[in-house]
Image (cartoon, rainbow, N blue to C red):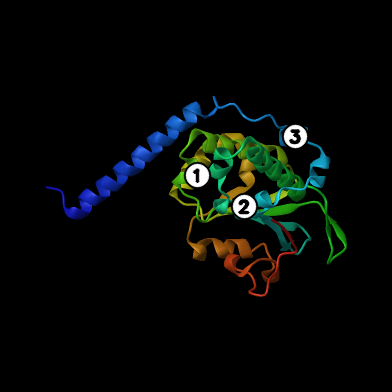
Amino acid sequence: MATGSESNFKCSISRKMKKLIHLLFLVATAYSIKEIPIPDYGQTDDTILQWEAPEETKRDYPYYLSGYDEDGAAIWVAELGKWDTRKATEGTPEGLRNYKRNVIQMLKRISGKEINQEKRTLVNEFYFIIDMEKFDSRQSSTRESLNLMLWVARQADQAFTDKLRAAYIVNANYVFNKVFELMKPLLGRALHKVEVHGTNRNIWIPKLMKHFPKEQVPAWYGGSKEHKPLKVYG
């Protein structure tokens, strides 16, 4: 006879398997969704940097330049776990286009040339901290939202050239890890530069701080309480 703890464990595994099966079903149909026409990252020139995103888009999908490492490489941060991908897919066609434009503009900014105002040098490399805190199954529970997340992965593959030193995905939970398994084939050659870390800050903060000066990142990533982003988009 199974004990109470054994029964709860089996139920937990069963629920996770059902979620995984549901996720795989969504993937099987995701690519049949007709995307709103918008050029991919590789087909978009730098004029996208002149585009002014609507206030709602900037508010819902922000990111920022946190600082620079000792060599002058830029440190960018995006709290993608808080980006409501599903809202973008369930809103207006124009809202979805704005979401995609915002993603491409972000990737153009972080992979483009940036002037280090402190050292007065040209920045040719960058780090990218991607915070997945608050990401949940709602974000990947429809065909459209999952397809949009895979679209973002395809854009990242085109943007993450040799200029990317490393991308650190932090606060990755069970749901995101399953989605990331689907993203891996789309990330191409950039995949070996991507590190995925779980929700235990005590594990990943020391790894991040091996690369970043304390005053150049926020306290919640192991940096300084006095830290302020150099540029905020959103």
Would residue 166 be visible to someone looking at this image? Answer: no
Callout in the foreground (1, 3): 1
In percent of width and height, residue 72 lies at: 79, 60
Can residue 170 be seen from the camera position used here?
Answer: yes
Task: Tell me if residue 214 comes above or below residue 79 in the rendering.
Answer: below
Mark 2 = which residue?
Answer: 60
User: For the residues carrying marks 3 and 2, which lies nearer the camera in this image?
Assistant: 2
Q: Secondary structure at mark 1?
A: helix
Pointers 3 and 2 in contact (C-beta within 8 Å): no
Q: Which quarter of the figure is the C terminus placed in?
A: bottom right
- Mark pair 1, 3: CA separation: 26 Å
Ranked by sequence position, the earlier of labels 1 and 2 is 2
Is residue 216 depicted above or below 22 in this figure? below
Q: Which mark is residue 139?
A: 1
* 10 Å crowding of disc 3: few (<14), some (14-19), many (20+): few
Which label is found at residue 42? 3
Q: Residues within 10 Å of mark 1 (few under 14, many from 20)?
A: many
Task: Please tell me which residue lies in front, 122 or 26.
Answer: 26
Q: Residue at x 18, y 54 (%)?
A: 4
Disc 1 from disc 2: Cα separation? 14 Å
Residue in the image at 68% along x and 29% along y: 37
Give the distance between the C-alpha atoms of the residues marked 3 and 2, in whole angstroms. 25 Å
Residue 29: percent from the left, percent from the top? Answer: 49, 27
Residue found farthest to the left: 1
- Of mark 1 and mark 3, the one earlier in the sequence is 3
Q: Amino acid at mark 2?
A: Asp
Number of numbered discs overlaid on the protein picture: 3
SS at mark 2? helix
Type of residue at label 1?
Answer: Gln
